[in-house]
Image (cartoon, rainbow, N blue to C red):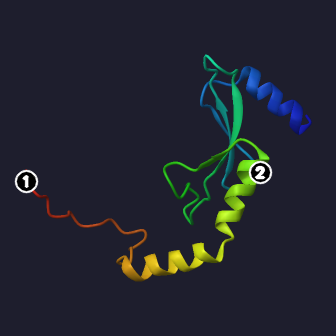
Amino acid sequence: MELTETLKAFIEEGGDWERKATTLAGVFIIRLPATKNRPASLAIDINPLGENGLPMKKKGIMIMNAAELAAFRAVFNSDKMDSLLKALEEVLPERKTGAKSKKADVVQL
């Protein structure tokens, strides 16, 4: 089945908020429900996979058109984004990956 036919079938027959994986790791297609103002539609959900094969974030980035993709690409490719991230990494404590964190002290209110 051709890609456009597959997408048309998904928008017509898929469930609200149903997510379909693609052959591109970390890229999913989500069926958005109809609202009062627009019919059901599709969006691309980008959420890269970690070493464990699971999405890195609870929610990914939803993209619905080429203009949105271009805007995200411009931000991600900005030199200022690199310098901002480096500064954040210097300020924030290092995160341990894969290990469960100890119980934090809880402030009683």
Residue at 67%, 31% in the rendered image: 31
Tag 1: amino acid: Gln
Asked whether, in this view, residue 51 is left or right of residue 109, the answer is right
Label 1 environment density (alpha carbons within 10 Å; few <14, some 14–19, many ≥20) = few
- Image quarter of residue 13: top right
Compared with 94, 31 (above or below) is: above
Picture coordinates of residue 21, whole percent (x, y): 69, 44
**Residue 23: numbered disc:** 2
Picture coordinates of residue 44, whole percent (x, y): 70, 44
Residue at 52%, 75% in the rendered image: 85
Q: Which residue is mark 1?
A: 108
- Disc 1 vs disc 2: which is toward the camera? 1
Compared with 21, 90 (above or below) is: below
Residue at 51%, 81% in the rendered image: 86
Q: What is the residue that sits farthest to the left in this orientation?
A: 108
Asked whether, in this view, residue 89 is left or right of residue 106, the answer is right
Tell me the element at label 1.
loop
Asked whether, in this view, residue 104 is left or right of residue 30, the answer is left
Compared with 103, 32 (above or below) is: above
Tell me the element at label 2.
loop
**Residue 16: numbered disc:** none
- Image quarter of residue 104: bottom left
Q: Earlier in the sequence, mark 1 or mark 2?
A: 2
Asked whether, in this view, residue 22 is left or right of residue 90, the answer is right
Q: What is the residue that sits farthest to the top in this orientation?
A: 36
Label 2 environment density (alpha carbons within 10 Å; few <14, some 14–19, many ≥20) = few
- Image quarter of residue 35: top right
